[in-house]
Image (spheres, grey):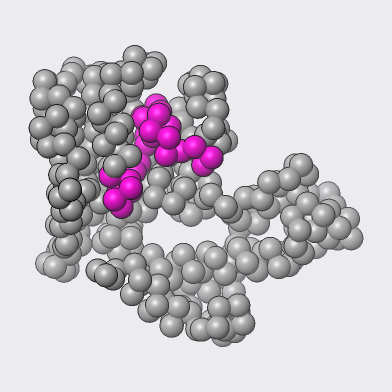
Amino acid sequence: MTKPKIMPDHLNVSLAIYQHVLATSLTLPVEMLLAGEAFAKRYNQSANTLLTQFVSDSDAMIRSRAGMSLVADEVLADSGLNRTIPDFIIVPSLWRNPRPVIRKQGRLIQWLNHCWQHGSTLIGVGTGVCFLAESGLLDNHPATTHWHYGEQFKRDYPRVELKPDFFITQSERIYCAASLNALADIIVHIIEQTYGRAAAQNVERNFSHEIRKPYEEQRYLEGAVDRHADELIAQIQFWLRTNLHSELSLAEVAEQFGLSQRSFTRRFKAAVGVRATQYWQQLRIESAKDLLASSNLTIQEVAIHVGYQDQGHLTKLFKTHLGLTPKHYRAMVRKKLFSQD
């Protein structure tokens, strides 16, 4: 079998198209990515060149919900499964019930599975998440979708862990967005990873004038939420995950939720299995690791972002828990992320 082609120095993004597709879930991410590329190349001509293409299982013209005519750049019937493997695949939302369309898209679903197995990152939007669920890639993993089809999604895909209270979920290399605004937040996150924080901030300012929570503070990240029956402790866990920079003590946090420090300490350990101090510290370390790997923030800025005013405190924690400094961790993980081996 021919080895899938990889295109270095390019950001290769494919967008699936099919009947009744919502055109905005195609045009919005492309325009945002183009803006990110343009900003990055203004300061660095060697920044990754963006390549986008529509992919379909047919060369027939496709009509979007808005009446726009779309033609595939890549037809799966012709190119098979050995075509260039995209870095990202966006699976857009459909207008109304997705079931009739999905039943006719076996080749596209097979292609999504193939590309994910070979390293592509998949982004499902609204009802487009059903394609990912149909492929089996979301089995035993979290997902979200358009609220109107939540109950139908649960019935059709009982093996998927639907998270209707979250607009974004992330499981390894699969992102799900419940809305166009959530998709925009994911695209800003990808632009930051690809073109840097300045490019991401520029795109966000131009496409969304309101102040919004950072991507990391609103996603459901697989493995970041413990499963137990104590709903109040689960609420406190969510608060801790989304307020890493808070200067409140855990006793003050417990008081906000109507618990004494003693009761909070006991219930937290019983539900989660570790002390609250350990849990919050680990959240901050994991968030710092993520920022060191995917952003260009300074070590001091990372420390502040995760709730430590003193860079030395973060360095001490990294040495204790990881055996290396934040600087050395960043060098190590980026070497792994960008290695061609």
* In this picture, residue 338 sits left or right of residue 306: left
| Count of number-bearing discs | 0
Q: Can residue 34 be seen in this view?
A: no
Residue interval drawn in magenta: 115-141
> On the image, which quarter does residue 6 sit in?
bottom left
Q: Is residue 9 above or below residue 159?
A: below
* In this picture, residue 249 sits left or right of residue 137: right
The residue shown at (53%, 74%) is 303
The one of 197 and 26 positioned closer to us in this rendering? 26
The residue shown at (62%, 50%) is 225
- Residue 300 placement (x, y as % from top left): 48, 78
Asked if residue 140 is among those painted magenta in the image, a careful observer would answer yes
The one of 262 and 267 positioned closer to us in this rendering? 267
The one of 174 and 83 positioned closer to us in this rendering? 83
Q: Can residue 145 be seen in this view?
A: yes
> On the image, which quarter does residue 68 sit in?
top left
* In this picture, residue 93 sits left or right of residue 222: left
Quadrant of the image containing the C terminus: bottom left
- Residue 138 placement (x, y as % from top left): 46, 38
The residue shown at (26%, 61%) is 195
- Residue closest to the far front: 1
The residue shown at (58%, 53%) is 224
- Residue 312 placement (x, y as % from top left): 56, 85
* In this picture, residue 237 sits left or right of residue 99: right
Q: Is residue 178 above or below residue 190?
A: above
- Residue 16 placement (x, y as % from top left): 24, 33
Asked if residue 91 is among those painted magenta in the image, a careful observer would answer no
